[in-house]
């Protein structure tokens, strides 16, 4: 009889993605015939634009189905650099670019090559679920910067400076942010960059939602003067072009960092899917009308969702400046009928009203829930009716 299986210790440093757990539970209920309104998924409900799909069809017809370079095709790297220059005024070349299997893969690669055991990495709260786990997996130490919901979860250089120690190596920033929708303006980003350069720390700028900004122009910290040796960009086509399943992301960084992450990727996934890379070239080089159309619809949905949430007695909801999430404060419900935190709130809401949301604990808070409004207006109305009814029942 063989010895009991022992897993590697490092696996215990990471947890199952909370957003994936919510999606899985909602899908289980749907299979059982339950009418679930799903506000959990961070995924556009739009279909991939036809010109992008047709580019993939052409790639198949031309038998573009073999390995590419581990870090992606030169054609796609150049397309990424050109699009980033057009959108944000940067000046990257393919030597400073690598293609990854989605934006999450870019974040993972960067953290693995930048963080040594014991290194401190500052992460603003609320944070996207993956940041904490990938830093832990690398042996790093997470230092959390608490932002104020009453100030729209706005991150400032002053907050960060108070947390920097001799062991601080980096900072992860997501703007617009998942889950809060908070956006850091160019002036504050400039102050943060100045602080990072002065203290010798890098910035990992997750630009997954960078084109989804409701007021003002989209902005990249990499466009600031003298930023390119400090700011390392993790980007994605998933949200901008409704290409979540295509799994194409990218990294923009100094050549030495690109060489390191390419070496790592060559032993993990190797190249992203060849066909998806051809589709991504078309997404970046082709018409951009779909981006503006999706943003306009997200703005309409945001306004509806925030209005409806604020009609619920006791619920506080900051207006998101970007992305497609609302992050309401539901502390008024805590302590009622045995609900002590966001996890129990979300579980009871799913059980009784069949609405799936992600509890704030996944993002570092316990008094909030995340609502994705990347779904139809009809579904938003149905789900918010149910949430309102649930909250009224808790108040009795």
Image (cartoon, rainbow, N blue to C red):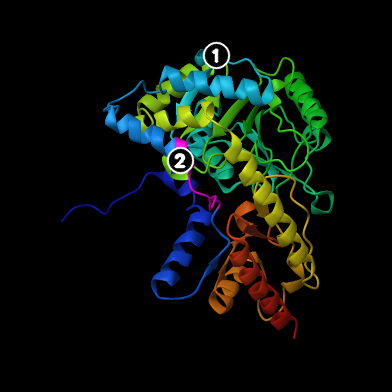
Q: Is residue 314 above or below residue 201?
A: below
- Which residue has dot 1 on it? 93
- Read off the residue under disc 2: 50
User: How many angstroms separate mark 2 from mark 1 (CA)?
Assistant: 28 Å
Q: Which mark is residue 233?
A: none
Image coords of residue 360 (percent x, y): 65, 58
Q: Which residues are magenta?
A: 42-51
Residue situated in front as seen by the camera: 229 or 236: 236
Nearer to us in this view, 197 or 390:
390
Q: Does 277 appear above or below 366?
A: above
On the image, which quarter does residue 195 sit in? top right
Say which residue appears at 32% left-offset and 49% top-offset: 6
Q: Is residue 230 left or right of residue 188?
A: left
Query: In the rendered image of this protein, does residue 62 appear above or below residue 369?
Result: above
Counting residues from the start of the chain, the first of labels 2 and 1 encountered is: 2
At label 2, counting other C-alpha atoms closer than 10 Å, the crowd grade (few under 14, some 14-19, many 20 or more) is few
Magenta span: predominant SS is loop
Q: Find numbered disc 2 in the image and state the secondary structure of the residue it sits on.
A: helix
Residue 272 visible, this angle: yes
- Local crowd at mark 1 within 10 Å, few (<14), some, or many (≥20)? some
Q: Position of residue 396 (x, y in %)?
A: 75, 86
Q: Is residue 361 left or right of residue 248?
A: right
Q: Secondary structure at mark 1?
A: loop
């Amino acid at each position: 009889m063989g010895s009991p299986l022992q897993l590697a210790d490092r696996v215990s440093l990471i947890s199952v993605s909370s957003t994936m757990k919510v999606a899985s539970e909602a899908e289980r209920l749907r299979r059982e015939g339950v009418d679930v309104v799903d506000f959990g998924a961070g995924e556009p409900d739009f279909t991939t634009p036809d010109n992008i799909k047709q580019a993939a069809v052409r790639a198949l017809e031309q038998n573009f189905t073999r390995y590419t370079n581990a870090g992606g095709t030169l054609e796609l790297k150049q397309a990424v650099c050109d699009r980033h220059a057009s959108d944000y005024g940067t000046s990257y070349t393919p030597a400073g670019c690598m293609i990854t299997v989605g934006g999450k893969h870019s974040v993972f690669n960067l953290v693995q090559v930048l963080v040594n055991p014991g290194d401190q990495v500052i992460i603003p709260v609320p944070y996207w679920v993956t940041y904490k786990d990938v830093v832990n997996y690398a042996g790093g130490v997470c230092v959390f910067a608490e932002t104020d919901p009453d100030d729209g979860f706005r991150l400032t250089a002053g907050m960060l400076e108070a947390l920097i120690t001799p062991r601080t190596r980096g900072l992860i920033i997501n703007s617009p942010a998942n889950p809060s929708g908070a956006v850091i303006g160019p002036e504050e980003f400039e102050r943060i960059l100045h602080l990072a350069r002065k203290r010798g720390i890098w910035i990992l700028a997750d630009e997954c939602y960078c084109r989804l900004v409701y007021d003002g122009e989209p902005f990249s910290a990499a466009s600031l003067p003298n930023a390119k040796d400090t700011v390392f960009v993790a980007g994605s086509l998933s949200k901008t072009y409704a290409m979540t399943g295509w799994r194409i992301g990218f990294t923009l960084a100094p050549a030495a960092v690109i060489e390191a992450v390419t070496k790592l990727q060559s032993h993990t996934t190797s190249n992203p899917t060849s066909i998806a890379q051809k589709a991504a070239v078309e997404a970046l080089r082709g018409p951009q009308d779909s981006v503006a159309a999706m943003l306009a619809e997200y703005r309409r949905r945001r306004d509806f969702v925030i209005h409806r949430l604020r009609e619920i007695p006791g619920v506080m909801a900051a207006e998101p400046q970007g992305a497609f999430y609302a992050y309401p404060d539901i502390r008024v419900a805590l302590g009622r009928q045995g609900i002590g935190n966001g996890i129990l709130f979300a579980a009871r809401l799913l059980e009784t009203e069949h609405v799936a949301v992600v509890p704030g604990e996944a993002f570092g808070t316990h008094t909030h829930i995340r609502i994705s409004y990347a779904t139809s207006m009809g579904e938003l109305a149905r789900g918010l009716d149910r949430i309102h009814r649930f909250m009224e029942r808790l108040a009795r």
